[in-house]
């Protein structure tokens, strides 16, 4: 096998639910091996022997490590036996955590297929948060900003919308308001009591590169101020000054993933709620 080919490997994700949990865990684990790239094979909603057989057939065609979340003991046994015969590692990602909880709680394990995705109050809270967030994207409906948990104020291309959606998926009603030089911010923003308001900035060179690529996609070469690094630096300083004046924390999103930015927002929110 060539050096280039060895950089890729197959990873099979077998789940009796949507596969969201196992996919996140697999990607977090694979991120620790920067020189190798996983080829993901998701086998979701595996709840019957025929569905498992189909997944095993795919594993045979493209052998690789198998990670699974299956509540049904018979399906688990069949998958583990098949992987053993193929000489492939097969790992249940939830079993260690479930066993630890059983010991700590001194409680009987009662597995429930897709239990982490039950249509409970938390689920509907997330749906409401997502609805609110989409309605309040890009400065829309400022009259109801007070109902938000978090309001993100940021210059263009600081990932306000995707960060808002990520937070909404955590159950937080999140609004985002663009900071544009020469355009007044909504007055409602300065009268907020309930929400946490956070400013988003980034390195001027990073923003300039992102904006330039954006304009290339749009085939727009006339907006020079939008990509001018000095102009962007002025935007950043103006927003930082505004945030300092109102006591709003600022997060520099340069080189940060959306998940990392959201984690910092959650930490700030926890600190606000503890006061």
Image: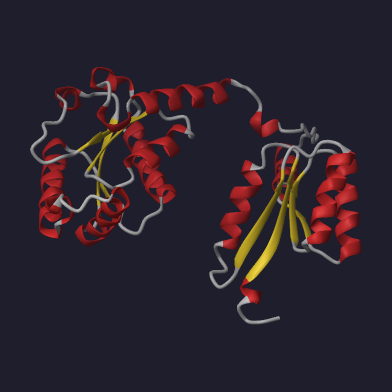
- Image position of 256 (left or right of 23): left
Which residue is more in the foreground, 90 or 184? 184
The residue positioned 91% from the left and 55% from the top of the image is 81
- Where is residue 134, by image quadrant? top left
- Image position of 171 (left or right of 99): left
Which residue is more in the foreground, 109 or 5? 5
Q: Which residue sits furthest bottom?
A: 2
Which residue is more in the foreground, 53 or 78? 53
x then y, percent, for residue 42: 69, 48
x then y, percent, for residue 250: 24, 46
Q: Is residue 40 above or below residue 8?
A: above
The residue positioned 18% from the left and 22% from the top of the image is 188
x then y, percent, for residue 253: 31, 52
- Image position of 66 (left or right of 256): right
Quarter the C terminus occupies: top left
Q: Is residue 248 above or below residue 40?
A: above
Q: Which residue sits furthest front?
A: 219
x then y, percent, for residue 155: 21, 44
Q: Which residue sits furthest top?
A: 143
The residue positioned 32% from the left and 20% from the top of the image is 147
């Amino acid at each position: 096998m060539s050096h280039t080919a060895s950089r890729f490997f197959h990873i099979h994700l077998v789940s009796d639910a949507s596969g969201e949990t196992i996919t996140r865990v697999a990607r977090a684990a694979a991120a620790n091996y920067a020189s190798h790239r996983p080829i993901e094979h998701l086998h979701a909603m595996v709840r019957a022997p025929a569905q498992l057989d189909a997944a095993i057939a795919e594993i045979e065609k493209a052998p690789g490590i198998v990670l699974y979340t299956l509540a049904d003991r018979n399906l688990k046994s069949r998958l583990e036996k098949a992987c053993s015969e193929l000489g492939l590692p097969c790992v249940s990602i939830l079993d260690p955590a479930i066993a630890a909880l059983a010991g700590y709680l001194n409680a009987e394990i009662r597995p429930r297929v897709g239990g982490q995705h039950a249509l409970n109050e938390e689920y509907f809270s997330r749906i409401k948060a997502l609805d609110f967030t989409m309605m309040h994207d890009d400065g829309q409906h400022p009259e109801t900003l007070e109902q938000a948990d978090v309001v993100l104020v940021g210059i263009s291309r600081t990932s306000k919308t995707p960060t808002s959606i990520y937070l909404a998926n955590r159950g937080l009603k999140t609004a985002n308001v663009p900071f544009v030089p020469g355009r007044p911010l909504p007055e409602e923003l300065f009268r907020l009591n309930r929400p946490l308001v956070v400013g988003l900035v980034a390195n001027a060179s990073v923003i300039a590169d992102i904006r330039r690529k954006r304009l290339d996609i749009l085939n727009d070469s006339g907006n020079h101020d939008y990509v001018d690094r000095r102009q962007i630096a002025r935007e950043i300083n103006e927003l930082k000054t505004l945030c300092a004046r109102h006591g709003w924390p600022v997060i520099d999103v340069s080189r940060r993933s959306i998940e990392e930015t959201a984690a910092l927002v959650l930490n700030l929110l926890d600190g606000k709620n503890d006061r």
